[in-house]
Amino acid sequence: MAGPYGRRISENAKLAIIRYRKNGLSVIKIQQLLKSHHNCIVTRPGIYNFLKKWKAGGGITAKKREGDERTLLPLHLKFVDFWLSRNNELTTQVLQRKLFEVFGIEVSCSLIRKRRRELGWTSVVSKTCQLISNKNKMVRLQWCLDALVRKEKFENVIFVDESTVEMSASGRLFFHHEGSKIEKKCARKPKPKHAYKVHVWAGISYRGRTNICVFNGIMDSVIYQGILENNFLPFVEKKFPDGYRLYQVRRQYFLLFQSV
């Protein structure tokens, strides 16, 4: 028996409803007592429907729907765990279809979600990042291990990099006041096909950061020399008069330049 927002009424709440009803209380009074004495919110239609089914001979224990937990055997769960380990983006509907195609069983999506949680799989909203090849993963790992062996502290190292910022918003959440004009209530928001972009260059180190340079267009050697002349050289003259090492990020590698 579903309560508010599709929730099921607990067995303790059902027993309380039956007890209050036998004492001659109305549905409204039962609803108030459930909220105040049992901390349980149940709608009046939910109470009325339960009492109707109870008087017709129904019990207080919810009947198991088709495709209960006895349908998914340990062998099925092993395959679900194996499929998720191979591809952690499989949805509940895909797992449901694969179970039917391989084993010929039909189970509900709610049961699959429950067993998936019991297997230790939880949903996580992840952010995207740059794809790194297996070759470059090993190069980066070796670089980090070498730094640990050398006990590198990067005290005289300046890391510089650039990033691109897209000057547009693509949010899907918006607010609308009922009294506002209909033109403001749009089902779709326009998004530019080629949004305006700016590039940001900067450097960080133990002794501080460089100035931030914001520019547009394509960076060539002339533009990059101007960025270094106006933002990088004044910084090293002030903060690193005793020499420095420059780590410049290019694609998947660190390029090392050492001052002389």
Image (cartoon, helix red, strand yellow):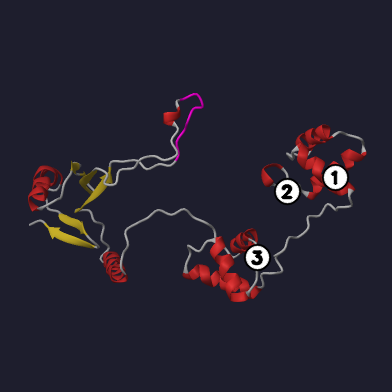
- Mark 2 or mark 1, whichever is nearer to me: 1
Question: Residue visible at 92% across and 35% down?
Answer: 24
Q: Badge 1, how many Cα within 10 Å: few under 14, some, many 20+?
A: few
Question: Residue visible at 49% across and 55% down?
Answer: 124
Looking at the rendered structure, the kind of residue marked 3 is Val
Q: Nearer the viewer, residue 199 or 228?
A: 199
Q: Residue beneath label 3, please?
A: 107
Relative image position of residue 144 (x, y in whole percent): 29, 65
Farthest residue toward the front? 182
Quarter of the rendering containing residue 172: top left
Farthest residue toward the top? 179
Q: Residue beneath label 1, please?
A: 52
Q: Nearer the viewer, residue 134 or 210?
A: 134
Relative image position of residue 260 (x, y in whole percent): 7, 57
Quarter of the rendering containing residue 189: top left
Q: Is residue 4 left or right of residue 155?
A: right
Q: Mark 2 or mark 1: name the one nearer the start of the chain.
A: 2
Looking at the rendered structure, the kind of residue marked 2 is Arg
Q: Report how far apart the C-alphas of labels 2 and 3 lie in the structure.
A: 20 Å
The numbered dot on residue 8 is 2
Q: Does the CB distance between marks 1 and 3 fall below 8 Å?
A: no
Farthest residue toward the right? 23
Q: Is residue 235 left or right of residue 84?
A: left
Q: Which residues are magenta?
A: 173-180
- Mark 2 or mark 3, whichever is nearer to me: 3
Q: Mark 2 or mark 3: name the one nearer the start of the chain.
A: 2
Looking at the rendered structure, the kind of residue marked 1 is Lys
Relative image position of residue 155 (x, y in whole percent): 22, 53
Question: Residue visible at 28% across and 66% down?
Answer: 140
Position of residue 218 relative to residue 21, above or below, is below
Position of residue 112 relative to residue 76, above or below, is above
Q: Report how far apart the C-alphas of labels 1 and 3 lie in the structure.
A: 30 Å
